[in-house]
Amino acid sequence: MTVVVVGGGLAGARTVEHLRGGGYEGRLVLLAQEPELPYERPPLSKGYLQGQEPREHSRVHDESWYAAHDVELRLGVTAAELDLGARDVVDATGARHGFEHLVLATGSQPRPLDVPGAALDGVVTLRTLDDSDRLRAAIDRARRVVVVGGGWIGLEVAAAARTAGREVAVVVRGALPLDRVLGPETAPLFADMHREHGVDLRLRADVAEVVPDGSGSRAGGVVLADGTLLEADLVVAAVGAAPRTALAERAGLAVQDGVVVDQHLRSSVPHVLAVGDVARAHHPFYGTHLRVEHWDNAQHQPATAAATILGRDEPYTRLPYFYTDQHDLGMEYVGWTGHDGRGYDDVVVRGDVGAREVVVLWLRAGRVVAGMNVNVWDVNDDIRALVERRVTVDRAALADASVPLGELGR
């Protein structure tokens, strides 16, 4: 029996790890498009980007681990086609890699900035280790940085650039950065924090074009839809990511904002599975399909994929989780507030908002559906338990920081 895993990120590396750890003794092939050992991506916009962490710290395993666990790691190999009839992955050289089970861990890719001038030198995206190297070098050379996009990656890059002493503006299409994720009640906390650190937030703004500098070949600034010119010698496009589904689509797998998979991570062809950013998985807790573009999903879904291949009934039920570090703010979030981010009817805040030491809880019909802890630690498991219990909790007790979260909802 042979299992082929396509994708050299965290999800791919954890899949082969869990297969071996779960007792799989067959042939195991990991195809990684990049020449790098499989690595994790959060450091690329955090510690590694700021020069605080060495390159090797991002690696999931060192090189010797793959040999010791009899994993055929093929670096720099691009999967070009899936021949599902023959059960082969065809790489860019035409070589075929046969499989009994295939796991797609192809991840996602940055969405391009679709405006005139976006192809100028000095307009960059962030996805790979090499991207992070180039971005760090560009920040070192830059005087003014414009970040287009007010999501997690954009704000983390803005924080890194400000920490490096650069002038930074962030262009946000919505009313606030992170408004869709955190809602109008909580998003101001992040907006205020960035303003206090000197970031120029341009809200309800769209980029109309990137204009060149005097050389004509490099970015010199961005023009907003209202005609405002923001000068910049570095423009970071952080306008979201798209799942890398081209292989799956050409092979005829069901695709809808990701490879559609069941709670066991099986695609519309049962011997083909998908994990991580590319997987739009049915979540039994919510009764719908979710695609979660965060580290935690890539970290934990592979255990379910391995169990499925090994014939075990272990559906993926872990609640969505993500975290961020920006300036002096550290945050964890667990739960889900609906596809539109508005599946709640109440917000409870406990702690000191001014000091940014706070827990925020989102409720629907008196039940906690999501929670966020900001610079308050060792409570995320308690928040997760509150969500999972689905019980009505006294609002006054939720708001009282003297009442331990672990005692609520029992």
Image (cartoon, rainbow, N blue to C red):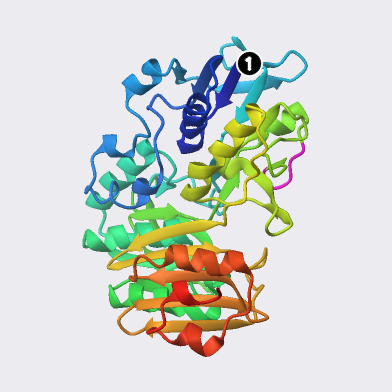
Q: Is residue 166 visible?
A: no
Farthest residue toward the top? 95
Which residue: 32% across, 62% down? 159
Q: Residue at x 45, y 72 (%)?
A: 406
Depth order, front residue of 155/401? 401
The magenta region covers 254-258
Q: Residue at x 47, y 86 (%)?
A: 399
- Magenta stretch contains residue 257: yes
Q: How many marks?
A: 1
Quickly name the residue at label 1. Answer: 90
**Is residue 112 visible in the rendered structure shown here?**
yes
Relative horizontal placement of residue 368, taking residue 210 as reference (left or right) = right
Residue 402 vertical position relative to residue 48 in the rendered view, above or below: below
Camera-side residue of 291 and 409: 409
Q: Is residue 246 magenta?
A: no
Quarter of the image with the N terminus is: top right
Instruction: Give the residue furthest to the bottom.
Output: 396
Figure quadrant of the C terminus: bottom right
Q: Nearer the viewer, residue 364 or 328?
A: 364
**Quadrant in the picture for residue 328:** bottom left
Q: Is residue 236 above or below residue 130?
A: below
Q: Residues within 10 Å of mark 1 (few under 14, many from 20)?
A: some
Determine which quarter of the picture holds residue 313: top right
| Residue 67: x %, y % from top left | 38, 15
Q: Where is 239 relative to 60, above or below?
A: below
Look at the magenta stretch and give its main secondary structure. Answer: loop
Secondary structure under the numbered disc 1 in the rendered image? strand
- Percent across and percent down for residue 321 are 50, 57
The residue that appears at 61% across and 29% down in the rendered structure is 103
Q: Amino acid at mark 1?
A: Val
Image coords of residue 357 (percent x, y): 33, 77
Residue 279 place in picture, x, y as percent: 63, 42
